[in-house]
Image (cartoon, rainbow, N blue to C red):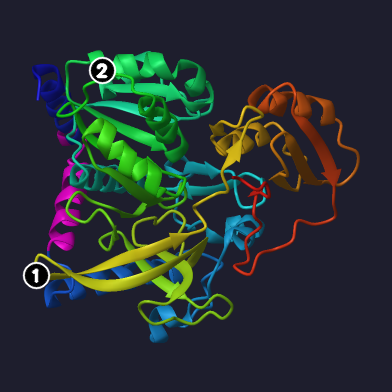
Amino acid sequence: MKFSEMARSQFFWFLDTINGGSVKHHLLDIAGIMSNTNTPLVDVQLLERLHKILNHAVNQTIFYSDVNLENGITSFPVIDKNLIREKIDQFITSSCKKYDLIPAITSGSTGTPFKTYQSKDKKKRNTADTLYFAKLAGYELGNKLYYFKIWSQYNKKTSFIQKLQNIVPIDVLNLKKNVSTVLEELNKNQTSISLLGYVSAFETLCKELDKGTKFQFSGKINSIITMSEGLNDYTKQQGQLHFGCPVLSRYSNIENGIIAQQTLSNPDVFIINKASYLVEIMDLVEDKLVDNGQLGRIIITDYYNYSMPLIRYDTGDLGIKDLIEINGIKQEVLTRIEGRKLDQIYNTNGELISSYIVYKNMWAYTEIEQYQFVQKGEKEYIFKVCISGKFEKESQLIEEFKEYLGADANFQIEYVNEIPLLSSGKRKKVVNEMVIN
């Protein structure tokens, strides 16, 4: 590491120390649990961790107050976004102070913003989780991080914070136009760098590099972690070919944090973050556990959010859990994850664009109750909208989407009473019905 990177790392730990050393404590705990999973000692620790959050939820929240603790977690109901949104006040603990509530906001499964709250200690736990799993992907604290996502006023970091954290924000909405400039910057950088962002962003970089552009990235890039979108074989293979570094996928959400991730030593399975969450796989219809190796709903119990306990939370995603031996240690892994992989969409020039342009736009249209974006053909798009009353911003929405899709896009709005549910209980927000040759 260069001196500047080491200085950033040391400064981070200095600030943590003078603030009580919480992140360091959490990081040591995570490392200890993850390196000794499925041992009697760790099993006892995790059982105590589970009992503690269950007791807290029953004694401190309205929603869980009637649950019988004698039967443990099996007595707790499965919850989802709709239930939490409807009864959010009942999930917040009675002893929690308002100043300790940190909002965590995501777009939700129907386009309606979904808000939960986290405690300050939970945020520190998430920081420790991030450091632990990022290191397993090759990232070192202090490395320059190129962060590919949609950057808005809501999540934009100040210039001071960017320099302090050594983050270079890359807005994926402008990536196609600036792809050569981004690659040139990566190429000329003299420090070790890491990449984090949407799969579609890295696919755009790979397609540009497929043209034969001469860059030398090997040995320069420490880690590449993808998020939010399902990692396809093309991006995984071509990313390693062009950048000289394995491309790994992270499974996480806003309301919880890092649930599982691929690692350098295990690039084809997702190591479950057993230290911070209980991950259960349940039947697609009934609230009952399925055997290892069977597809089911991914259900999360968060051990650390004491401000707003989320117990047996249905993420809306599907997955397969299994137990495999890694370096002589039995590890819980997800061998398959579905529901995170959104249908890919293309602009009128046939270029792949991030499906997250759909979510970015919808923050400005909170009056829309449900929506679904459908690509019907090369230049044919339908936007299905469920709304009460007249939609006053129709022309505005059409013009905004045409900016991303192309001025020659045939973009129409169709009003519907309901977006139908999938068998998983989710409403698919992005659908591609185009036949791609």
Q: Residue furthest bottom?
A: 70
Depicted 126 relative to depicted 245: above or below: below
Q: Can you identify the residue that label 1 sits on?
A: 328
Q: Is residue 257 visible?
A: no
Chain-order first, disc 1 or disc 2: 2
Depicted 264 relative to depicted 401: above or below: below
Which of 318 and 160 lies nearest the eye of the viewer? 318
Q: Nearer the viewer, mark 1 or mark 2?
A: 2
Tell me the tag on residue 187: 2
Which of 295 and 163 lies nearest the eye of the viewer? 295
Q: Is residue 220 left or right of residue 204?
A: left
Quadrant of res 354 = top right
Q: Which residue is pictured at 42% across the width and 43% down the height?
A: 100
Tell me the tag on residue 165: none
1 and 2 marks in contact (CB < 8 Å): no
Segment colored magenta = 17-35
Percent across and percent down for residue 157 are 41, 22
Q: Residue furthest right?
A: 390
Badge 2 density bin: few <14, some 14–19, many ≥20, Cα 10 Å: some
Quadrant of res 346 = top right
Q: Is residue 29 magenta?
A: yes
Q: Is residue 321 left or right of residue 33?
A: right
Q: Which residue is pictured at 23% across the width and 51% down the height?
A: 263
Q: Is residue 63 left or right of residue 21?
A: right
Question: Mark 2 belongs to which amino acid?
Answer: Asn
Which of 359 and 83 lies nearest the eye of the viewer? 359
Question: Mark 1 belongs to which amino acid?
Answer: Gly
Percent across and percent down for residue 90 are 58, 61
Depicted 135 relative to depicted 57: above or below: above
Q: Is residue 144 left or right of residue 99?
A: left
